[in-house]
Image: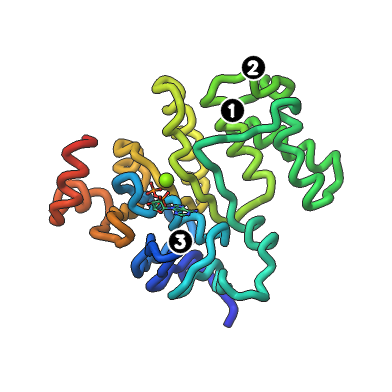
Amino acid sequence: MSWTPDLPIVSLKDVHKSFGDFEVLKGVSLDVMKGEVICIIGPSGSGKSTLIRCINALNDIQGGSITVEGQEVSDPKLDKLALRKKVGMVFQQYNLFPHKTALENVMMAPLKVLKEDPKTVEDRARSLIKKVRLEGKEDNYPGELSGGQQQRVAIARSLAMRPDVMLFDEVTAALDPETVKEVLVTIKDLAAEGMTCILVTHEMGFAREVADHIYFTDRGVIVEHGPPATFFAEAKDPRTKEFLSQIL
Ligand code: ADP
Ligand code: MG
């Protein structure tokens, strides 16, 4: 069956994931519609990174189903490269190539992986650097940029593959407080343009303002979820309440 935009672009159904005997995800289900922003919050070790890494098949799953645009991610016939073009991912550690400029970092994957025309790739890379509000920094090396600027180059690099969905795993957690905001603004810009975003984040102000839906995970299950208004005002589960009381 072919996917249409009225169906979830990402869908997890009863996903189970173990590392050896240790079950990290114990039946996780969630649906994301095209253009939605989903925030996943929860204590450290609750399985948030594992969950989003399953979506682009960086982790395999032992039970349940994950589909992206209707395609089963665990299907052995699935082209993983095609999946990862469709689903971009940005991590806490941005890992830019230190000996390449910002522009070269953004151009690299489309040139090497997609083998696209260099001029087209460069034009698009320049416009992506503008999009993440780094115009003028094209020729700077990562070491000459702040953490927040480097993270925005990493976001531009991921966008250069023209993904349909973006995954962000605590992308501001390692940044100085003054550069956190500029990265969040970049993600907000993307969301406003209709990019589907799935974020693991502890930035509650951002989640409240930008998320369509918030999921709270604890020990491998989704304990509670809802749109920000109800999530923050009416959290019922004691684990959610305790977490929010510590973080807010
Ligand atoms: P979170 O992102 O919520 O902090 P993680 O998804 O990183 O949580 O980890 C959930 C649990 O799975 C942790 O107990 C962690 O130690 C374990 N874990 C994560 N990755 C691996 C791995 N590759 N091998 C074994 N255990 C892992
Ligand atoms: Mg994590």
Judging by the rendered image, the residue that carries numbered circle 2 is 144
Which amino acid, mark 1? Gln
Q: Is residue 6 visible?
A: no
Which tag is nearer the camera, tag 1 or tag 3?
3
Give how far apart the Cα atoms at labels 1 and 3 are: 32 Å
Residue 31 against residue 46 in the figure, above or below: below
User: Nearest the camera: 229 or 224?
Assistant: 224
- Residue drawn where x is 51% and y is 50% of the image: 167
Per the image, label 2 sits on a secondary structure element best described as helix
Q: Secondary structure at mark 3?
A: strand
The answer to whether the residue labelled 3 contacts the one labelled 2, judged by CB atoms less than 8 Å apart, is no
3 or 2: mark nearer the eye? 3
- The answer to whether residue 80 of the structure is visible from this angle is yes
Quadrant in the picture for residue 102: top right
83 shown above or below 93: below
Q: Nearer the viewer, residue 106 or 143?
A: 143
What amino acid type is highlighted by mark number 2? Glu
From the viewer's perspective, is residue 110 above or below residue 1?
above
Taking the view exactly as shown, the residue that stands out farthest to the bottom is 1
Tell me the distance, in whole angstroms, between the alpha carbons under discs 3 and 2. 39 Å
Q: Amino acid at mark 3?
A: Phe
The answer for how far apart the CA atoms under marks 2 and 1 are is 9 Å
Q: Within 8 Å: ligand 1 and the Cβ of disc 3?
A: yes
User: How many residues crowd mark 1 within 10 Å: few (<14), some (14–19), many (20+)?
Assistant: many
Tell me the colour scheme of the image: rainbow
Q: Which mark is residue 19?
A: 3
Q: Which residue is mark 1?
A: 150
Q: Which quadrant of the structure image shows residue 107?
A: top right
Query: What is the x, y in percent for residue 33?
Result: 44, 63
Name the image quarter holding the C terminus.
Answer: top left
Q: Earlier in the sequence, mark 3 or mark 2?
A: 3
